[in-house]
Amino acid sequence: MPKELPLRITQDPSHGFTRHPASTIRHPDLVLTLDTYADDHIRARAYGTALPPSPHEYTARLDVSPATIRTSAARLRALWKRELVAYEPVDPMTGMPAGEPYATRLDLTDAPELDDILDELAEQGAYLLWRELLGAGGRGADRLRGVVRDALDGEKPLRIRVDSALFLPWPMLALPKGVEESPLHRFLGYRHQMEQTGGRYADFADEAESQLPPPLPVVSLNHDKNIDPYGRTRAADVATALAEGTVFLERSRRDELLAALKSGRMDDQLMYFWCHGRFEAAQDAGAPLLLVRLTDSQDIDAHTVLARHTEGLLPHRPLVLFNACYAGLPGGADLTYLGGALIAAGAGGVLGPQIEMPQVFAAEYAYAFVTRYLGAADTAGEIAHTLARHFADTFRSPLGFAYALHCGMDRRLERIPSGT
């Protein structure tokens, strides 16, 4: 009986002429670019079908320094940690604990003080976006702010791409206060599907259907086995879900990850990191850079990946999901450098938290995400948006908004169709 053999294209004499984008690729409804200049202003441009037709581009000079915006973003992340993650209810009369700390809880529906906390988080997120950034003033700023606000305030969820090296926690930003029934509905992460590029799309490989997926999905669990030794989270359920119906790769040591990188070819389609993280000062006095550690406590950073970066290292464009327990999140920390290195090596996208995420919520989020992603029906952007709304509507938790997608909005697990 004739049998169709797997085909891998090693040369393309037509130079991509016959290639077609993957079926999941669609142009965003709104693209916002932010370019930094001379360290004293930002050039902004917006385009897409969500904006009204215009004979001129929607562009603006925003008279605010990039350093000021980065500082404000760090302050917002610190506010979420202080006012939400670290909150412990106390009895106002006795000063004694009056309930479980928020960090140990998934469900916040019975937390009466949460309304004030959410109001404050939304107000600060709106202030950063509409006052400090888009409200900074400058030529064209009022016009740009108006059309972007009208688009974001619409009832229809948009697919939004922010193309900028000025990496902000966009899902944690919010609309100005309006008539919403819940402050949760003000957050951009609730209203829209979003990705950020870190300004890397100029070097991002074109999507092409020249790479067949492996016979079974290849997924990896890169983890520190010492996290949650008493099984208080769903970490074990995540591992079980990753291993079901897949080629499952488990790495718990730095040398195991290095061996995979040195092999020159990794077939991972989904890479999940459940580990510890810390930040190390950059030698050039820049923002502290993220390092992660597996069970052996050996540092893994962007240079670990870049030093072994060869063309085609990650041929299946894996989605990388980070759940790193930070020992502390410095205000000026660079959360994107390691993710950017993985994208340079071929990763299709990186999803990770922008704040110190409680382990209970992190494991619950990971379980919900990987089970949906392995189903191969929805894209990473669709799943992230669905989960943000799910945790907000079901548990009144805004922590789903703290996960940011670095590229990868259109990534979906590719499987060989049944019967081939």
Image (tube, rainbow, N blue to C red):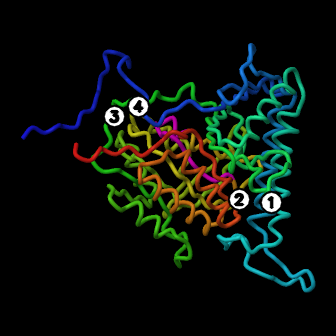
The answer to whether residue 58 is magenta is no
Distance Cα–Cα, label 4 vs label 1: 45 Å
Question: The C terminus lies in which quarter of the figure?
Answer: top left
Question: The N terminus lies in which quarter of the figure?
Answer: top left
Q: Name the residue under label 2.
A: 398
Give the foreground label among 3 and 1: 1
Q: What element carries label 4?
A: loop
The answer to whether residue 345 is magenta is yes
Residue 118, numbered circle:
1
Q: Can residue 67 be seen in this view?
A: yes
Give the mark nearer the N terminus: 2 vs 1: 1
Give the mark nearer the N terminus: 4 vs 3: 3
Q: Position of residue 151 (x, y in %)?
A: 74, 35
Q: Quadrant of residue 220?
A: bottom left
Q: Name the residue under label 3.
A: 211
Callout 4: 10 Å neighbours few (<14), some, many (20+)?
Answer: few
Q: Residue furthest left?
A: 1
Callout 1: 10 Å neighbours few (<14), some, many (20+)?
Answer: many
Q: Position of residue 20 (x, y in %)?
A: 40, 25
Q: Name the residue under label 4.
A: 311
Pick the residue in front: 68 or 170.
170
Residue at 41% across, 53% down: 375
Kind of residue at disc 4 = Glu
Asked if labels 1 and 2 touch by Cβ distance under 8 angstroms, the answer is yes
Q: What element carries label 2?
A: loop
Kind of residue at disc 2 = Pro
Distance Cα–Cα, label 2 vs label 1: 8 Å
Distance Cα–Cα, label 3 vs label 2: 38 Å
